[in-house]
Amino acid sequence: MTMIFDVFTEATRGTTLSGTVQYRDPDNYGFNQGPAFGLQLIMEGWTERGDFGPASVSPAMEAEFKELYELYFGPKARVDKEGYLLQDGSTEVRIPRVKAAEFYKGRLDPYGGRGFSDGVHYLDLMPEPGAFARRTEEIIVSWEIAEDDTYEIEEDGGTAASFTLEVSDKRYLEHFRKNAFFQTTFTGHLPEA
């Protein structure tokens, strides 16, 4: 996956996070103005922990971020090799036996498919962009992004923008306790259902 943006953030101030996003490509494609981009940056910061990245989060926040990722990308239905649904947290087929294709009829991602991860087969389900947009409205109180002409850009880098966002609850920013740097492929656009 090619990273599109470098993201630099300051430490949070209560429920506010500020920073910059810079295109890695010298061409300027513009910056998405919608608040979903702000939520996506918060989510991506959660996955990009490390020496320069954001810190860890509480178990409750980790569960919420996983839920947001499932809304955006679509959840995975865990199945056996014949396509029968598995019990939660197990490799045993659930009783009564039912094929995922029947149980999730109309919800299987036509662009997704089958996969195998951590010793378990899975089928991709469709993303839920409407639900993601509703959650964005609940979480992001304000979002501002503006191209930054004063930001020093490296020769091979693209345009930069400054952003400030405010969230409804400071726990959404608990992983930004210090300045951070990470990269992302998120662009602010919502998936197609």
Image: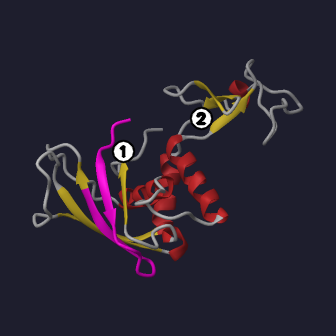
Asked if disc 1 and disc 2 are in contact, CB closer than 8 Å, the reply is no
Between 136 and 93, the one lying in front of the other is 93
User: How many residues crowd around disc 2 within 10 Å: few (fewer than 14), some, or many (20 or more)?
Assistant: many
Task: Determine whether the residue tagged by mark 2 lies in a helix, strand or loop.
Answer: loop
Which labelled disc corresponds to residue 185?
1
For badge 1, the amino acid type reads Thr
For badge 2, the amino acid type reads Leu
Figure check: 159 above or below 80:
below
Residue 44 x %, y % = 44, 54
Chain part drawn in magenta: 1-21
Between 36 and 7, the one lying in front of the other is 7
User: Which picture quadrant has residue 1?
Assistant: top left
Point 53% across, 49% down: residue: 69
Q: Residue farthest to the front?
A: 51
Figure check: 154 above or below 142:
above
Residue 88 x %, y % = 79, 42
Task: Determine whether the residue tagged by mark 1 lies in a helix, strand or loop.
Answer: loop
Find disc 2 in the rendering and name its residue: 125
Residue 70 visible in rendering: yes
